[in-house]
Image (tube, rainbow, N blue to C red):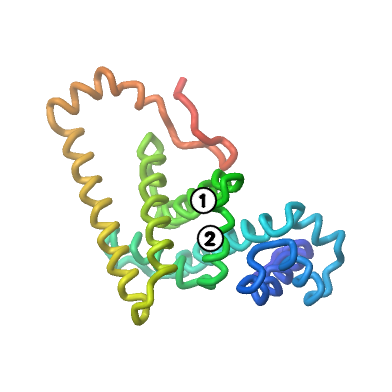
Amino acid sequence: MQADNSMDTAKSRLLTAALVHVPFDGWSDVTLRAAMADSGTAAGLAAGLFPRGGVDLAAAYHKWGDQMLRDALAQADLTALRFREKVTHAVRLRLELVDQEAVRRGVALFALPQHIPEGAALIWGTADTIWTALHDTSRDINWYSKRATLSAVYSATVLYWLGDSSEGNADTWAFLDRRIENVMQFEKIKAGFGQNRIGQALARGPLKIFQRISAPMAANDLPGRGND
């Protein structure tokens, strides 16, 4: 795990040490204490980095996976791929970069009622990472619809992947291809709707309000803003 400063170094060290214990104790305070002992991290520093214990540890691991994906896509040459192939590649790469058991334990944690909103936000962050890395230029309501759709695809693929026993996860990649194909069909229908007379009439009337929706100006600007 790359680090930018001493705090990042400590966080990276704790996450790395925690991965050994996650298969046995999940993303928990027990795992955090074990990681502190293994890495020689002071309790005060660990509490500052992960004040909610295992929950913050799990969230940090998910965000670390997004950062690895961001770095990998920045270095990859995807010019020969069609756009749908780029999206498929990004989702597959995101899964290949992380530990399956660590993800399994994270899914179980964020499935708890009190953590569902945070889990959904983390998945949205992954979808945003992919679209941003692939240079998505949408700034209207499509900014949201693309991320919402990819969040659903990513979530479903993760769950399939966790139960996949096929060689090389071949069944998971086939499942992912089918989900991406569904998304592409939806985008074609949406584009066609905007080009026919009924769609155009609705856009000038009842659906005109959606033209006021724009992408957020910053990461903390969700869910966006209306144009003045």
Location of the N terminus (image quadrant): bottom right
Q: Position of residue 71 (x, y in %)?
A: 52, 66
Numbered disc 2: secondary structure: helix
Pick the front one: 142 or 33: 33
Q: Mark 2 Cα within 10 Å, few/some/many (few <14, many 20+)?
A: many
Pointer 2 residue: 66
Pointer 1 residue: 125
Residue 84 placement, left or right of 77: left
Check if mark 1's residue and mark 2's residue have beta carbons within 8 Å. Answer: yes
Q: Does 180 sit above or below residue 23?
A: above
Q: What is the number of the mark on residue 162?
A: none
Which residue, as the protein is rendered here, is positioned at the far bottom? Answer: 167
Q: Residue at x 35, y 59 (%)?
A: 87
Q: Residue at x 40, y 44 (%)?
A: 148
- Name the quadrant containing residue 157: bottom left
- Name the quadrant containing residue 35: bottom right
Q: Position of residue 113 (x, y in %)?
A: 57, 45
Residue 205 placement, left or right of 42: left
Residue 97 placement, left or right of 29: left
Under mark 2, the amino acid is Asp
- Name the quadrant containing residue 201: top left
Under mark 1, the amino acid is Gly
> What is the tally of numbered marks visible in this picture?
2
Q: Mark 1 Cα within 10 Å, few/some/many (few <14, many 20+)?
A: some
Pick the front one: 41 or 141: 41
Mark sitting earlier along the chain (1/2)? 2
Q: Position of residue 127 (x, y in %)?
A: 44, 52
Numbered disc 1: secondary structure: helix
How far apart, in angstroms, are the residues tagged by discs 1 and 2? 8 Å
Residue 17 placement, left or right of 226: right
